[in-house]
């Protein structure tokens, strides 16, 4: 917007000073000191305009009106002089002061953002998926002061080979295990969406739900499954990956779900999305100091891992191999998408 447009916008569409909607009764009441009903009687009795009635009934009003006329006349004279020698400078100078204040406010805003606590949102299909996919990165972010939130989309009620346990019992146990694992990593909160295991689809409803959490928590980083991974057997992993990616689009663009903006849930654009178990990873995170913490968190998932005594060796070996390729003792790999 150019300088003249800013001045016009400030002063009003027709470049006049803004006016205020004040009733005639209020004018009389304020000048004479009468109530609005009494003021109406004064107007009727005098048979003239409200301002003239006020002047007739109150000499002080006449003085005030005369002083106002003098001020307006001086303003016209001053404006005529400025037109001859400096009106252009005046029009430039006023917005310049405003621009300086705007830059100062922006500096303060960035300073607030720089000291603001960073946030990460880790979205997995089942309890234990977040630990396997980004347990080291989550622990590292939490250790560096980030606010980390886990979302578990299904209840994991089919993840057992024990014929003596029901899906209802299993879902309760797995939530307890997930809470314990998150506590080991330093995760601040865990949200359970409690969809049935194995029945998930990337629907518009799931996308909207994830978009709502993104707008609410305002994460700078989002972690989830890579839905494009070849030969991925579990349908829930694909569904959560696609729903998260589509949910980010709905969260960042205001024309998606416009009703949320009308109730104060504003759009939010994360800085980056990290896909674990990626088909084509292009980002490696050094988690050398967080391997034991990741393993300790996974240990909490007893229903999933107690039967397998070799899983720790495989996890440590895989993290070491990833790190060795890039000069780290241990690492986790992702596909990073800048948003």
Image: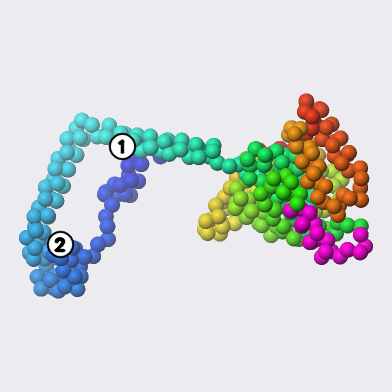
Report the disc number at residue 312: none
Magenta residues, as a range?
162-179
Q: Secondary structure at mark 2?
A: helix
Q: Quadrant of residue 201?
A: bottom right
Seen from the viewer's position, the closer of residues 123 and 118 is: 118
- What number is the disc on residue 31? 2
Q: Residue at x 24, y 34 (%)?
A: 87
Label 2 – label 1 distance at C-alpha: 34 Å
Q: Is 165 included in the stretch rendered in magenta?
A: yes
| Residue at far top of view | 327
Q: Position of residue 52 (x, y in %)?
A: 11, 63
Quadrant including the C terminus = top right
User: Would residue 39 appear left or right of 137 to someone viewing this image?
Assistant: left
Question: Which residue is at a point 88% across and 63% down the rendered structure image?
Answer: 165
Callout in the foreground (2, 1): 2
Give the total of numbered labels.
Answer: 2
Disc 1, SS: helix
Q: Residues within 10 Å of mark 2 (few under 14, many from 20)?
A: some
Which label sits on residue 94? Answer: 1
Q: For residue 90, which quarter of the picture?
A: top left
Proximity of marks 2 and 1: CB atoms separated by less than 8 Å: no
Q: Position of residue 276 (x, y in %)?
A: 77, 42
Indicate which disc, 2 or 1, sits on the residue closer to the N terminus.
Answer: 2
Task: Give the image location of residue 293, x and y in percent.
Answer: 77, 41
The quadrant of the rendering that contains the N terminus is top left
Let me know if residue 64 appears in the view. Answer: yes
Query: Of residues 178 and 31, which is closer to you in this image?
Result: 178
Q: Residues within 10 Å of mark 1 (few under 14, many from 20)?
A: few
Q: Residue at x 82, y 53 (%)?
A: 235
């Amino acid at each position: 917007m150019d300088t003249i447009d800013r001045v016009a916008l400030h002063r009003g569409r027709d470049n006049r000073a803004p006016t205020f909607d004040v009733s005639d009764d209020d004018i009389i009441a304020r000048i004479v000191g009468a109530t609005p009903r009494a003021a109406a009687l004064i107007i009727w009795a005098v048979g003239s305009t409200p301002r003239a009635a006020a002047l007739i009934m109150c000499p002080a009003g006449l003085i005030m009106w005369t002083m106002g006329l003098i001020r307006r006349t001086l303003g016209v004279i001053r404006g005529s002089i400025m037109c001859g020698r400096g009106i252009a400078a005046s029009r430039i100078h006023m917005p310049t002061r405003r621009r300086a204040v705007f830059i100062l406010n922006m500096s303060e805003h960035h300073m607030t953002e720089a000291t603001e606590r960073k946030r990460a949102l880790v979205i997995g299909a089942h309890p234990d998926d977040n630990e396997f996919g980004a347990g080291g990165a989550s622990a590292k972010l939490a250790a560096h002061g980030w606010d980390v939130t886990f979302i578990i989309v299904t209840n994991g009620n089919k993840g057992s080979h024990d014929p003596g346990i029901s899906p209802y019992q299993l879902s309760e146990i797995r939530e307890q295990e997930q809470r314990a694992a998150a506590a080991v990593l330093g995760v601040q909160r865990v949200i359970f969406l409690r969809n049935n295991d194995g029945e998930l689809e990337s629907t518009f409803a799931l996308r909207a739900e994830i978009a709502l959490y993104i707008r609410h928590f305002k994460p700078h980083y989002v972690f989830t499954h890579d839905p494009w991974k070849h030969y991925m057997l579990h349908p829930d992993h694909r569904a959560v990956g696609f729903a998260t990616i589509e949910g980010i689009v709905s969260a960042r663009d205001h024309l998606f779900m416009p009703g949320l903006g009308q109730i104060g849930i504003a759009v939010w654009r994360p800085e980056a999305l990290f896909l674990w178990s990626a088909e084509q990873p292009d980002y490696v995170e050094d988690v050398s100091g967080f391997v034991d913490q990741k393993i300790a968190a996974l240990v909490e998932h007893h229903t999933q891992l107690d039967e397998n005594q070799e899983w720790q060796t495989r996890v440590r070996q895989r993290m070491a191999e990833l790190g060795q390729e890039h000069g780290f003792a241990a690492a986790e790999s992702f596909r990073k998408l800048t948003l």
